[in-house]
Amino acid sequence: MTAITETTSQTPGATVWRDFAASGVALGSLAVFALLVAAALLAPWIAPQNPFDLTQLDVLDGRLPPGSPGGAVRVYWLGTDDQGRDMLSAMLYGLRLSLLVGVGSALVAGSVGTLVGLTAAQAGGRIDSGLMRVADLQLSFPSILIALMVIAFLGRGIANVLLALILVEWAYYARAARSAALVELKSEYVEAARCLVLPPHRILLRHVLPNCLPSLVVIATTQVARAIALEATLSFLGLGVSVTEPSLGLLIANGRSYVLSGETWISLYPGVALLILMAAINLAGDQLRDALNPRLGP
């Protein structure tokens, strides 16, 4: 009887966390992600150098191998790039921008897409059909093509990259929110709320939306990693952030001209950091998906 009482007294959030924490992969990926976020946030204090402050750079320190002593920094543990920037410092600052782009675009696109999806589910009819046709049209084009069109029209810069990623991502949230809301709108508690003559927007926001959040959170984790990868691709092609706004993709691009000459660290270390960041987010997202809905697990 005690065991039954303990089990039934657990909140849904506690159950999800218990299932999530039961996986070593989940805890490991979450720890790695938290470490990378902390390193990015603390970059101004822990980075040996501000890599984009021209007064701290010396071209004579350009392309020094890892472990080399230097003038601006006592030891370049990860070497320097062609402009004499400390690679460790540049990566810490690059992490900040990559995370800003990934998380920022997911938050805005998630909010817009969720609002569109809930509106479509509630309104039905022509409004639902029209909104979903727009979402389907957006999803029919490759993401990189839409992003390239936006950047080509507006130009480079972090604000334009964010706008491009938001335009790419919102339809995923809209589709997921609509599907989840349609199920919830047929439930008994929604019928009871309607009998109480509650306003439609209150039913959506206070009753339907909380039950749609689990699926939207899982989508958000995958979209954060996807946005980081897309931004890195744009920056690698020279179409993303400007040279004064560091990102991991831009750092990788800076070293591609020196790979054949053996100076691989300029591209290698940012590439490894990008790979670890995306792997941590995707693994944590997969485990969160399984914790929220065990039937989707292996």
Image (cartoon, rainbow, N blue to C red):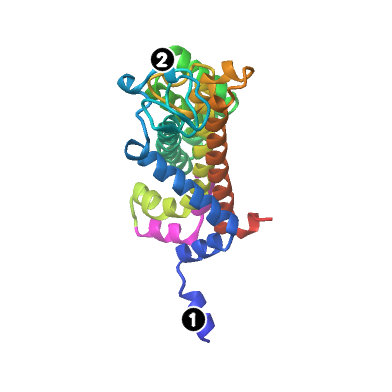
* In the image, residue 80 lies in the stretch drawn in magenta: no
| Residue type of the residue flagged with mark 2 | Leu
Which residues fall within the magenta stretch?
176-196
Q: Magenta segment, principal secondary structure?
A: helix
As drawn, which residue projects farthest toward the bottom? 1
* In the image, residue 181 lies in the stretch drawn in magenta: yes
Q: Is residue 288 visible?
A: no
Q: Which mark is nearer the camera, 2 or 1?
A: 2
Q: Is residue 139 visible?
A: yes
Can you say which quadrant of the picture contains the C terminus?
bottom right
Q: Quadrant of residue 88?
A: top left
User: Going by the image, does 279 lie left or right of 77?
Assistant: right
Of callouts 2 and 1, which one flags the residue occurring earlier in the amino acid sequence? Answer: 1
Front position in the image: 174 or 87: 87
| Residue type of the residue flagged with mark 1 | Thr
Q: Position of residue 221 (x, y in %)?
A: 51, 44
Label 1 sits on residue: 5
Label 2 sits on residue: 154
Residue 38 lies, with reference to residue 160, above or below; the image says below
